[in-house]
Image: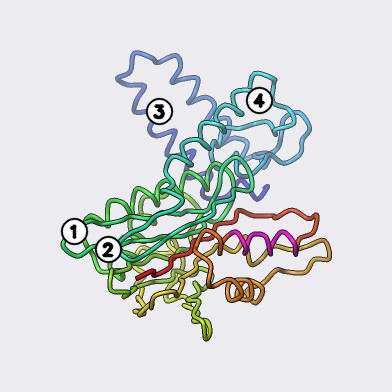
Amino acid sequence: MPDVADAFIREQLLDRRKRLTSAIVWSREQTRLRELLSEVDAALARIDGETYGICEVCHDTVERARLLANPLVRYCLDHLTAAERSALERDLEMAASLQLGLLPSPDTRHHGWEISYAYRPLGPVSGDYCDLIAEESAKPELFFFVGDVSGKGVPASMLTAQLHAIFRSLVARHLAVEQLMHQAGRVFCESSLSPYFATLVGGRAEAAGLVEISNAGHCPPLVIRPKGVTRIEPSGVPLGISSDDEYLAERLQIEPGEVLVIYTDGLSEARNAQDEEYGEERVVKSLLENIRLGPRSLIQECLDSLKQFLGGASVADDVTIMAIQRTA
């Protein structure tokens, strides 16, 4: 049986069959519902016959991301009709527009902090998650999040939107960072009928320079100081692995001029034509050489360094970089 016909796909199809069977009892649209039920049964039969996930035209494997998004798919992209291809393109354009609409302002100032980020999807949509939440209260706070959902394409982008909704809701409850990460991990795990998970860094910055930050299996964030660099190692597993995981938060004092940089592995794991990895050392070198620049220019220098390293090669993953600098 092809790898795409795994337990998750079967579970998703069985759940869809149960819902359709219940809906047929009371719905007036029984004809269409019975057609959908027939499609689900046919997909289950293909799993039992070990032909699920195989294109019915060329007999090659259908793209996994499309099967996860719609388990009834029967054709690979190369064999869609012109109308189907056009509809898919419109869906991708809408998904990309919606995802970009969830991003925060690219340049933010908030009570002694200046924040910028670069968000570079590999395709129309991205599996990277990026958000800033500025709290205006008696004790102004800045919440920041950068993550990377496993997988690519529309399924991964849908889960970044889910993370956005989860954290936006939880921040309003004024939880400690450890609790915020734990609750987010629990909700993400229990509400995602998905084999995906998300590495993620989340934290809170106060006006006086205190930062609480937690790393859920993500690339170590870097605190760039004139005399060196501090790495913030993971304190827990990625979100979505288990609903019971606990996370620790590290507390740091960031002084004026110092910068906290969070990035996704699309930056550090990029490879050039000689199959050399860009690596964390080059990331650190670029940041240290340009620490006196503001966050926007610092990020641009880092991207320019990556471009020079790659030569004519292309990145193979989404790239996100966030720089949070204390200015006062």
Q: Residues within 10 Å of mark 3 (few under 14, many from 20)?
A: some
C-alpha span from label 4 to label 3: 27 Å
Q: Local crowd at mark 4 within 10 Å, few (<14), some, or many (≥20)?
A: some
Magenta segment, principal secondary structure? helix
Residue 233 got which mark? Answer: none
Label 4 amino acid?
Arg
Q: Which mark is residue 137?
A: 1
Task: Write down the residue under mark 2.
Answer: 141
User: Can you name the residue that lies furthest to the right here?
Assistant: 274
Q: Amino acid at mark 2?
A: Glu
Local SS, label 4: helix
Which residue occupies the extreme left position in the image?
138
Work out how far the residue at label 4 is from the one at label 1, CA to CA, in angstroms.
49 Å
Looking at the rendering, the stretch of residues picked out in magenta corresponds to 300-309
Q: Do the CB atoms of the residues marked 2 and 1 lie less than 8 Å apart?
A: yes
Nearer-N-terminus badge (4/2): 4
Whole-number angstrom distance, CA of label 2 to CA of label 3: 46 Å
* Marks 1 and 3, how far apart at CA: 48 Å
Which percent across, then down, holds residue 288?
Answer: 58, 76
Q: What residue did someone put label 4 on?
A: 85
Circle 1 sits in a helix, a strand or a loop, which is it? Answer: loop
